[in-house]
Image (tube, grey):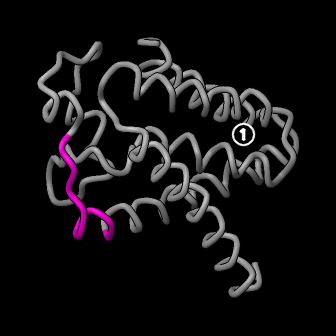
């Protein structure tokens, strides 16, 4: 579970970069969609965090999480105004969801592996004590909605 919660996402990053360079046109389009979707997710996450702040389970429940939280690595991209240790929505889940839904949309060969990774990461983040189930659900919904909005924007701009 520690591997899934902390390290699996780096394997996903490596694979999508590898497929973006050496893959077919679907993989390259999926990579571009996922990068644009992550930008949209950044905006949505900032809006959500204006209104919602939820302490992490290990703070609220006074438990020791199985992994350490490194605010600089984990949250710097999704916290423009400084470090934000808010539990909702799960940033790891947002990232893997955007990537997964982008590759599913383009019917990439990586889709099955990414679905497996999404489920593993989502469950692992709860298991190790750094997220609540609602944080994970919120992350999946923000990820899916980010990809949807990005596709709608693409259609609107005729690109």
Percent of width and height locating residue 66: 29, 13
Lateral position of residue 70 relative to residue 131, left or right:
left
Local packing at callout 1 (Cα closer than 10 Å; few below 14, some 14-19, many 20+) is some
Instruction: Tally the numbered discs.
Output: 1
Residue 148 covered by magenta stretch: no
Q: What residue is shown at x 40% (from left), y 20% (from top)? A: 127
Q: Nearer the viewer, residue 135 or 111?
A: 135
Q: Nearer the viewer, residue 81 or 25?
A: 81
Q: Nearer the viewer, residue 131 or 95?
A: 131
Percent of width and height locating residue 50: 22, 69
Lateral position of residue 133 relative to residue 67, left or right:
right
Lateral position of residue 134 relative to residue 115, left or right:
left
Q: What residue is shown at x 24% (from left), y 62% (from top)? A: 52
Q: What residue is shown at x 18% (from left), y 49% (from top)? A: 84
**Residue extending furthest front?**
61
**For mark 1, what is the residue?**
20
Q: Is residue 61 above or below residue 29?
A: above
- Residue range in magenta is 47-55
């Amino acid at each position: 579970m520690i591997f899934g919660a902390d390290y699996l996402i780096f394997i996903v990053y490596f694979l999508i970069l590898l497929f973006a360079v050496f893959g077919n046109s679907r993989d390259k389009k999926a990579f571009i969609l996922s990068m644009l979707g992550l930008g949209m997710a950044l905006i949505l996450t900032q809006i959500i965090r204006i209104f919602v702040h939820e302490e992490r389970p290990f703070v609220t429940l006074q438990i020791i999480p199985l992994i350490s939280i490194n605010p600089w690595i984990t949250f710097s991209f999704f916290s423009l105004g400084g470090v934000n240790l808010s539990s909702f929505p799960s940033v790891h889940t947002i990232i893997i969801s955007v990537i997964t839904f982008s590759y599913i949309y383009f019917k990439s060969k990586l889709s099955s592996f990414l679905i497996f990774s999404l489920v593993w990461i989502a469950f692992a983040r709860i298991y190790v004590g750094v997220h609540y189930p609602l944080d994970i659900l919120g992350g999946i919904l923000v990820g899916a909605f980010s990809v949807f909005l990005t596709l709608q924007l693409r259609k609107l701009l005729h690109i």
